[in-house]
């Protein structure tokens, strides 16, 4: 059975307002202070199990820039298996949530008999997953989103009364922090690549200088020799250059 419209009212069970607020305040503080992506994902996993009642399996799906999906964190190997099946079939809760407008929410009380997931649902049921709830990262953002939070239950209707508001707020916090960490990771990778490029340029310059001196040739000819050897032995030019620089006394 398919879920009601994403923004429709619903019943929920779970912590009372005061406890809910306390737990979310602690979650937000911990998540904001997470020093790296791995720690942020661990905090999200812990919060998901605590704040969304009825969850047996929980995973975090992220979409890469090329459009491919990946399970970034999970509470169970079975969740990874079922997530990968979604990516392969191009069908399932996390894909629905990442592509839906509005809150980006998909819920199903009986996955085996939901026409929206005709292949994934029966496969999940064979693994004793009976109901699901998935929330896209960045609610109300333009699909496709950067991923989703995926809650699974072994019981039919096991997530019917889960606090979807908690799931949506959890996804909003998770999206903001994960996006920030991804930006930092990308900047660090770019810096590392720049440093590596400078190191490679320096070592190639050393190797060219050695060849120019030993063979009495100009810079262009020295570079052509490096390039030719690199192509012939199928080894990076920088690696060839480093070998020459390290073994200059043997040449």
Image: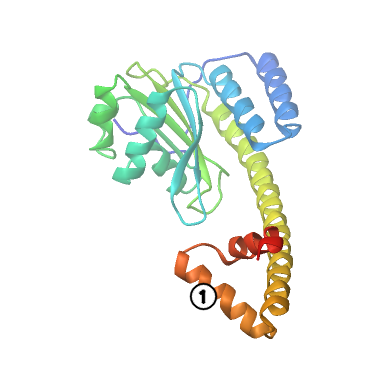
Residue 113 location, quadrant: top left
Residue 199 location, quadrant: bottom right
Residue 42 location, quadrant: top right
Locate the N terminus by quadrant: top left
* Closer to the camera in the image, 150 or 181: 181
Q: Residue at x 49, y 52 (%)?
A: 143
Its colouring scheme is rainbow
Residue 190 coordinates in the image, percent (x, y): 68, 57
Give above or below for 89 relative to 79. below
Q: Is residue 92 visible?
A: no
Locate the C terminus by quadrant: bottom right
Residue 150 coordinates in the image, percent (x, y): 46, 31
* Mark 1 element type: helix
Give above or below for 130 relative to 210. above
Q: Residue at x 56, y 29 (%)?
A: 165
Q: For mark 1, what is the residue?
A: 228
């Amino acid at each position: 059975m398919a879920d009601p419209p994403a923004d429709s009212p619903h019943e929920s069970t779970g912590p009372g307002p005061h406890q809910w607020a306390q737990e979310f305040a602690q979650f937000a503080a911990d998540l904001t202070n997470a020093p790296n992506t791995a720690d942020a994902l661990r905090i999200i996993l812990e919060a998901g199990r605590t704040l969304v009642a009825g969850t047996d399996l929980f995973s975090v799906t992220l979409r890469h820039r090329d459009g491919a999906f990946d399970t970034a964190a999970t509470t169970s190997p079975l969740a990874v298996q079922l997530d990968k099946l979604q990516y392969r079939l191009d069908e399932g809760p996390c894909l629905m949530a990442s592509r839906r407008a509005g809150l980006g929410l998909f819920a199903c009380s009986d996955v085996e008999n939901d026409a929206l997931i005709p292949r994934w649902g029966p496969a999940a049921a064979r693994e004793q997953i009976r109901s699901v709830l998935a929330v896209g990262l960045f609610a109300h953002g333009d699909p496709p989103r950067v991923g989703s939070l995926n809650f699974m239950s072994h019981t039919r209707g096991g997530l019917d009364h889960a606090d979807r508001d908690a799931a949506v707020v959890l996804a909003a916090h998770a999206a903001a922090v994960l996006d920030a960490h991804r930006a930092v990771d990308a900047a660090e990778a770019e810096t590392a690549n720049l440093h590596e490029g400078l190191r490679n340029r320096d070592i190639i310059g050393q190797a060219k200088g050695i060849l120019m001196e030993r063979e009495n040739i100009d810079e262009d000819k020295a570079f052509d020799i490096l390039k030719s050897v690199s192509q012939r032995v199928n080894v990076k030019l920088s690696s060839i250059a480093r070998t020459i620089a390290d073994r200059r006394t043997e040449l």
